[in-house]
Amino acid sequence: MPDRVLAVLTAPEAGSEVAEPFRFADPDAPLLRVLDLGATRGDGVFETLGVGAGRAQAVDAHLARLARSASMLELPEPDLDAWRAAAIAVAERMSEHAEAFVKLVYTRGVEGSGRPTGWVLGAPSPDHSVARTAGIRVVVLDRGLPHDSAGELPWLLQGAKTLSYAVNMAALREARRRGADDALFVSSDGFLLEGPTSSLLIKRGDRLVTPSTSLGILAGTTQAEAFRFARLRGLTTSYEILGPEGLTDADGLWLLSSVRNAAPIRSIDGDERPIDAAFTADLNAHLLARRD
């Protein structure tokens, strides 16, 4: 049973005619050029898909977001058929793992070459059972921009899933320094945004709410599936611009991501929050079973 599977795309951009869209490669072999702009400048985009029993989840949603992020960076349009074939093939080779993930990486390529680079890596997922059941401790961190800055500052690439994740990782380290498991970003004027690697989900009675993507946050694929699950159960859903009261008057709070799925928030800045264990279990069961 392989622990890691790697596929390198032959021509990750649209419009290239190649006999084979990708080739499998040794993940321990030296493959990435040291002048690749993805490595030297974080100039690229990525997506991470959950995998259950060898089936890649939410493939089309992730590919659509990959294309959207690439467009925001003015990368060449990705060949989505090639990326889809590589992602599915890698996921199938992870079939003996109960849970795994597949990461798609698309960079501008070697500086000056004009040719992008793309690869797909599959690996087993960490055990997230404790986070899904016992919940996570979260601290609130200021992202440093007002909530309405996305339209005025497009060069900051708010809402694109780029390889430039140093700030996100720094936020997670700060959360751990404060004795927490994760962080929740707010705007400089106090509006709720997202986690460094996750979307925020709020339950109020029979409604599920998440911050609006107009705030320059990433459109969450797992959050979208959570909304679909909620509507199947007769709940209403909405995207809203939410102030800090969105946390205090909630019946349940979660951070959602493609691999960890739904992690209930059990404390915010040290203040205990209620966990809706039954809803969390049902939501995670749905997310783990999804196939498209």
Image (cartoon, helix red, strand yellow):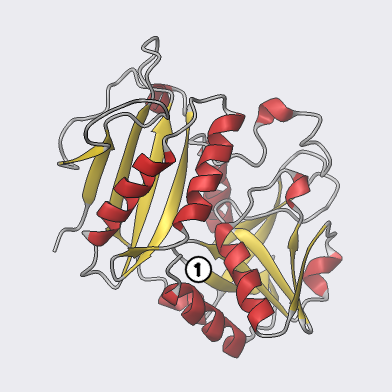
Residue topped by disc 1: 261
Left/right of residue 10 with respect to residue 67 in the rendered view: left
Q: Which of 141 and 221 is in front in this view?
A: 221
Q: In the rendered view, tell whether residue 160 sits above or below residue 172.
A: above
Left/right of residue 239 with respect to residue 275 in the rendered view: right
Measuring from the top left, give residue 261's x and y in whole percent: 50, 68
Measuring from the top left, give residue 168's x and y in whole percent: 56, 44
Left/right of residue 61 with respect to residue 17 in the rendered view: right
Residue 169 at least partly seen: no
Q: Which of 60 and 139 is in front in this view?
A: 60
Q: In the rendered view, tell whether residue 46 sits above or below residue 56.
A: above
**Residue reaching furthest bottom?**
278
Residue at position x 27%, y 31% in the image: 10
Residue at position x 25%, y 69% in the image: 97
> For residue 120, which quarter of the picture?
top left
SS at badge 1: strand
Measuring from the top left, give residue 24's x and y in whole percent: 18, 42
- Mark 1: few/some/many CA within 10 Å (<14, 14-19, 20+): many
Left/right of residue 12 with respect to residue 169 in the rendered view: left
Check disc 1 and give the amino acid type. Answer: Asn
Residue at position x 45%, y 33% in the image: 78
Measuring from the top left, give residue 16's x and y in whole percent: 35, 25
Residue at position x 58%, y 39% in the image: 68
> For residue 179, which quarter of the picture?
bottom right
